[in-house]
Amino acid sequence: MNLDELISEYADIEGRLADPSVHADQALARRLGKRYAELRPIVETHRELASTEDDLGTARELAGEDETFAAEAADLGKRKDELEERLRRLLVPRDPNDSKDVILEVKAGEGGEESALFAGDLLRMYLRYAERVGWKTEVLDSHPSDLGGYKDVTVAVKAKKGSQDWGAAGRSHGGETEGVWTRLKYEGGVHRVQRVPATESQGRIHTSAVGVLVTPEAEDVDVQVDPNDLRIDVYRSSGPGGQSVNTTDSAVRITHLPTGVVVSCQNEKSQLQNKEQALRILRSRLLAMAQEEADAAAAAERKSQVRTVDRSERVRTYNYPENRISDHRVGYKAYNLDQVLDGDLHNVTQALVDADMERRLAEAQKS
């Protein structure tokens, strides 16, 4: 769509949202409200640009008579350039999932118990990062290891309205506040750690790996799951070492027969609650699969985004002896690993957001 079409769409949605009958359909009202919020920064920036251009024209006409207007014209000229750049960035096609919440899974990989311990460290990093920016987190499923790490853990990360505060540099799409997916989608891939494990008696540095999978959380309107396509098994929950932590069959395993996707959940005491959590995870995975297929069919290579990244690709290294963190996709390197692991992840994610924006700007200029 061009700018005129977007402005027309904004006006149309504004009129529909003023109609009380629209709000009788809550799903429709939510979709319209979401699109209205996406378009608002574009329309407001366009209006401010038009007003600034008018003021600039007037100031230039009067500059010959009063030098005060000459200074004002110079300021307005700078403001006009800033608004034009902001509008250019806002008009770059955006990721349709940017406003979504996410399901984040951390899985121990090569390295045995040390990998499980680092999976726990990554989990704490994400939980503290979420706390810093005001996101809500909910552990959906977890399988602890014997030494206090995690074999795998699944967390839902949800934004609260008005919670993100990135600052001026962190408004990633030209001025509007973004959702959880905007930041965490780049976390998907293999995370490598280099450190002396707690289980190492001779002080040798080991390298192990942890896999992170991030998918946008699907809403009911995104993915329709036919109950007839599901095989649901129940079993008893178990903790580290296999000891029983539940005397009832409350754990749930759901198999989506058409795709073979299997999801299990045992964190809740209630079988019904575990089933609901498993269905949330299943819907997000099916949404990611559908988008991967659509991307492949359109030959749209989105290398910087988690859903098309090669899961075997090493995306980041955490080097404890040097207190260094390196993101290999954008060449980011910093020596504040201790702070990053404590949740200060903003500069790392911002480097990835900025790189993705520059790529999309370049693609928009070619088209």
Image (tube, grey):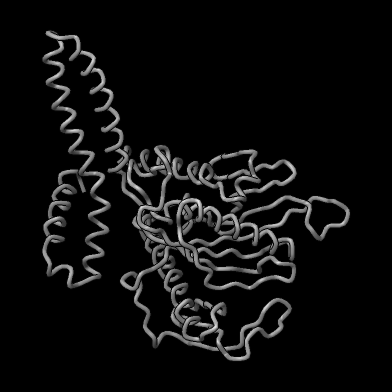
The image shows a total of numbered marks equal to 0
The answer, for residue 83, to whether it is visible in the render is: yes
Q: With respect to residue 90, does 287 lie above or below?
A: below
Q: Nearer the viewer, residue 286 or 54?
A: 54
Occupied quadrant, residue 364? top left
Q: With respect to residue 297, does 52 lie above or below?
A: above
Q: Quadrant of the C terminus?
A: top left
The answer, for residue 255, to whether it is visible in the render is: no
View extreme (bottom): residue: 248
Q: Nearer the viewer, residue 50 or 344?
A: 344
Residue 246, position as x, y percentages in the image: 63, 86
The residue sitting at 33% across, 42% down in the picture is: 175
Q: Is residue 14 left or right of residue 146?
A: left
Q: Is residue 212 left or right of residue 290?
A: right
Residue 217, position as x, y percentages in the image: 42, 66
Residue 199, position as x, y percentages in the image: 81, 60
Q: With respect to residue 272, does 174 lie above or below?
A: above
Q: Nearer the viewer, residue 165 or 142?
A: 165
Occupied quadrant, residue 18? bottom left
The residue sitting at 57% across, 50% down in the picture is: 343
Q: Is residue 128 left or right of residue 11?
A: right
Residue 163, position as x, y percentages in the image: 40, 53
The residue sitting at 39% across, 58% down in the picture is: 160
View extreme (right): residue: 202
Q: Nearer the viewer, residue 364 or 10?
A: 10
